[in-house]
Image (cartoon, coloured by chain):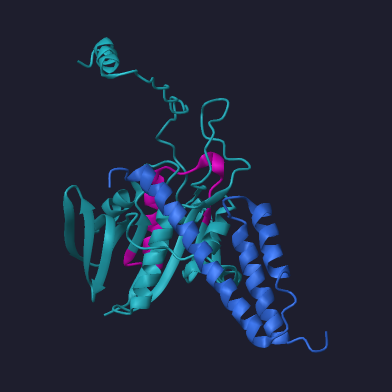
Amino acid sequence: MSTTNLPLRHQVIRIYKELLYLSRDYPQGYDWARSRLHKAFSSQAHLKDEEAIRNGIKRAEFVRKEIEALYYLKRYRALRQRYDPIK
Amino acid sequence: MPGLRILVPVKRVIDYAVKPRVNRAQTAVETANVKHSMNPFDELSIEEAVRLREKKSTPVEEIVAFSAGPPKAQDILRTAMAMGADRGIHVVVEEKDALEPLGVAKLLRKVVDEQKSNLVILGKQSIDDDAGQTGQMLAGLLNWPQATQASKVSIEGDSVTIIREVDGGVETLKTKLPMVITTDLRLNEPRYASLPNIMKAKKKKLDKKTLGDYGLDSEVRLKTVKVTEPPTRKAGVKVEDVDGMIGKLKELGAL
């Protein structure tokens, strides 16, 4: 582990925690989302190349944005259906 | 010209995705062990306040989030601060003596005086009581102009232009600060209160107060007679052909 790139490692842990936090609101439930998330990260654990890790982080950031947008849309649609059904 | 001092009242309500259950005594909706979150319309108001700051057309001095509710309403204020409010005020009101819209409006008037706010942005209604009265009552008590259900807000100096969606089109209102705005669903897209921001919000100031500090008590004017589930929809029937349908319609007296 002596060659581990520490700043990158922290970035990975940070985005993992953020995604884990987001998972709590996931429609299929926390347990479902957490196990999927864990699998997704552990499947990339072998990555050693700095560039590849950076790309992985970028992908995780993209997923985070997508999930946030998903939550927003889900709520917006539910509210629109309840409060403003004609438009 | 002084900057905007925005007050954003928020409410802790049962999460929109939870199906509420009426309690056995039919006096209220079950709230114990149910997921709660910020009233979605209040998220729109926080977001709008933060966007006014980011737009920089009029300087925003301060965004204060306010909530009157049980101790757990604190979490909601943290969310508000994570989204961008500068500090919070929490008036602790136990769940059993929850305030009515008029009570909230009276309380807010005192808070507006204390904080010297010149703009109050409220959600148009809460998704639990759906009263949709607080903003209007507050504007009346303060004798300020109000724009309800705003779908676009722009502020230049101290003149405010509001666009609202009305039947068959849009209505544009122009007025001056100070004023009260309530938000409609299409005003903006609230940002997500992310984990790092929630952590940062823990360092922001949160004042705890009681109704007594504002010289008020929770007087009850309304009495809930009964709370019931909406009637379940009756199942439809399939008809064989057009004649069958006409027969059914005649039977129901629709023809």
**In-image side of B92 versus B41 (left or right):** right
Relative image position of residue B139 (x, y in whole percent)? 28, 54
Question: What quarter of the picture does the N terminus of chain B occupy?
Answer: bottom left
Whether B176 is among the magenta residues is no
Q: Residue furthest bottom?
A: A3
Q: What is the drawing colour of chain A?
A: blue
Q: Quadrant of residue B179?
A: bottom left
Q: Nearer the viewer, residue A64 or B85?
A: A64
Q: Quadrant of residue B58?
A: bottom left
Assign the magenta stretch its main secondary structure. Answer: helix
Q: Nearer the viewer, residue A2 or B85?
A: A2
Q: Which residues are magenta?
A: B91-119
Q: What is the drawing colour of chain B?
A: cyan
Q: Is residue B178 visible?
A: no
Q: Is residue B246 visible?
A: yes
Question: What quarter of the picture does the C terminus of chain B occupy?
Answer: top left
Whether B99 is among the magenta residues is yes
- Residue A9, relative to residue B202: is it above or below? below
- Identify which residue is drawn at 74% across, 74% down: A45
**In-image side of B5 versus B95 (left or right):** left
Numbered circles on residues, count: 0
Q: Nearer the viewer, residue B58 or B20?
A: B20
- Residue B235, relative to residue B110: is it above or below? above
Relative image position of residue B42 (x, y in whole percent)? 42, 56
Relative image position of residue B253 (x, y in whole percent)? 24, 12
Q: Quadrant of residue B246?
A: top left
Q: Residue furthest right?
A: A1
- Identify which residue is drawn at 59% across, 62% down: A22
